[in-house]
Amino acid sequence: MSKIIDGLYYSESHEFVKVEGDFGYVGITDYAQHELGNVVYVDMPEVDDEVEAGEDFGAVESVKAASDLVSPVSGTVVEVNEALEDEPGLINKDAFENWIIKVELSDKGELENLMDAAAYKAFIGE
Amino acid sequence: MARRTRTMNNTFYGKLIFELSKEGRKGYSLPENKLAEYKLADLPDALKRQEAPCLPEVDEMTVVRHYTNMSNNNFGVDTGFYPLGSCTMKYNPKINEQMCNLPEFTHLHPLQGEETIQGALAVYYNLQRSLAELSGLKEFTLNPYAGAHGELTGLMVMRSYHLDNGNPNRVKVIIPDSAHGTNPASAAVCGLEVVVVKSRPDGTVDVEDLKPLLDENIAGMMMTNPNTLGIFEHNIAEIAKLVHEAGGLMYYDGANLNPMLGKCRPGDLGFDIMHINLHKTFSTPHGGGGPGSGPVGVREGLEKFLPNPRVSREEVADDIYWYFMEDCEDSLGSISGFLGNFGVMMRAYAYILTLGKDEIKNVGPLAVLNANYVKESLKYYYELPLDGVCKHEFVFDGLKDKSTGVTTLDVAKRLLDYGFHAPTIYFPLLFHEAMMIEPPENESKETLDEFIEVMKKIAIEAKENPELVKSAPHNTPVRRLDDTKAALKQIVTYRELLSVDEL
């Protein structure tokens, strides 16, 4: 049974957004990390890069597969989680704690297109 | 229990070759030095090595024993069945090797004049014609070095076609979500944009999902048929019609051509461009272990875009003369040195001629029969998400009984204990515990029965003694590897190994 946190926004491609003010922390869900298996590399954008909702912003490589990271929101990257460069396995330890990028949201209205915890729980069939 | 013993392997000679090194020992004797008047001191400093190379010092017998022991640790298509035959490589008949090792071919040099390499040009031309006939397309180039290179070449043909028609905006390539990963990769390398079309619950392309994607920016659509789930895309005629009406071209990924041989031709299904992986369908060695080859075929009207050089023939009196065609100015250019990997073409041509026009028609039907036989025999033990007749391959979604905690990875590892190679696992990505099985046409019923029996046995072991399966393999030279650590801490040379304190 995967961990799902109330109050976060979820995408169909298994990314989450945790909103704090005008910023959103984006990462992959616990369900996603479990499906991927041990993560061995996270390809991240750079600070000041623009991300767009529905577009790729990087990739996660595990021993099983490489998966694109699809941004659930649009905006400017203000921070990347550098700890993942040395220790990508942190995502397996706690996917929600170890977000991948922090985005300054350009359109908070986009959050309405995402799922809440209950909808995501139903989506993954748990 | 273990059908394959490893006791024949010598542990001493099985060490790393560097560990067998003894200072001053050598396995050669040099001939008389005819260049004795040249002195090392005369060499400029910049050309002199600053430190000795790190090379093992061993005698010939040690070298032979070491590598023979190493080869015994390997699993190959010459030692046993592997259930991913037409995906990775089917058995390579030895006559292929004999043909490509004929000195008349091995002693050729690519810069020789064409009148002295008539035989080689004839092989190139005839193989090209054979592939064209088998796939229902107008013309082939054999120049690409491998399947993925062929994909790139094919997409460059697609791009050239649209540029030639004054449509530089046609850059979007539609690819099903079940596609091989090389499809989007090739499109990206070609500078094209990837648009994903969803699959229906039965694993085939969702035509309704496709329709809104077809606009004036579409370059074409890439498809594998049968798809990566082994299901024939029965809507292919409608899909091809829709893509063509939108001005796009249809690209056929030849990865699953094997079951089509003798039954169905991509050209007749409406495809305009395709590549063939010679190792999957025409019994050549797999590119990962040596040179590969990825011929590309096109329908009439697209041949002028094919890469240079191309080979043609003309009849002179009672004889035939093969020649390099003059470079075509519409060609996308050259994508390889000379004509590509000629030795691989020789093997594929030998395979086609050995089977002949009548026998080759049995390849597809027999591969399909074998796959369905294995599928039906095992579907009460393993989860079959898509029931019904498959083509040359099918996908199980792990064990039927999920309560044991035994995963697809565990089953794959346990198969090694019984002397079988593991199938493709965790692909396609549409299922969580995917296990893709494809026995090619040349495996006997006895071999398939043995495989089925072992697969059943593993399913029973998973119930009765799950730990045994979870901790497999037990009988292989190395046990389960830490693939996470291997990916994170890559040590690929002996020098690197020496510099590591602990593994």
Image (cartoon, rainbow, N blue to C red):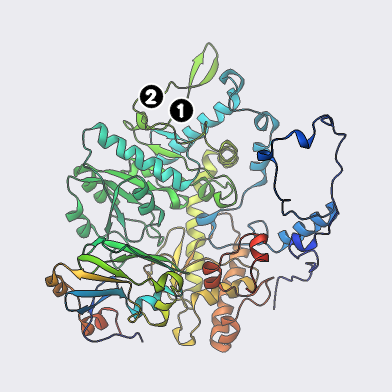
Is residue A104 placed above or below A117 in the rendered structure? above
Residue plotted at (55% across, 27% down): B122
Residue B470, horizontal then vertical, whole percent: 56, 82
- Return the chain for callout 1: B
On the rendered structure, is A59 left or right of B72?
left
Q: Secondary structure at mark 1?
A: loop
What residue does disc 1 label?
Answer: B310
Q: Nearer the viewer, residue A74 or B435?
A: A74
Amino acid tagged 2: Cys
The image position of residue B321, as x and y in percent, is 53, 18
Quarter of the figure that contains the C terminus of chain B = bottom right
Position of residue A112 in the picture relative to residue B149 (left or right): left
In percent of width and height, residue B203 lies at: 33, 64
- Rendered residue at 65%/69% (across/down): B419
Q: Chain of mark 2?
A: B
Residue extending farthest to the top is B317
- The circle drawn on residue B224 is none
Q: Nearer the viewer, residue B64 or B468?
A: B64
Asked if disc 1 and disc 2 are in contact, CB closer than 8 Å, the reply is: yes
* Label located before the other in sequence (1 or 2): 1
Question: Is any part of residue B384 visible from this angle?
Answer: no
Residue A82 location, x and y as percent? 38, 71
For label 2, the residue is: B328
Report the Cα–Cα distance between label 1 and label 2. 9 Å
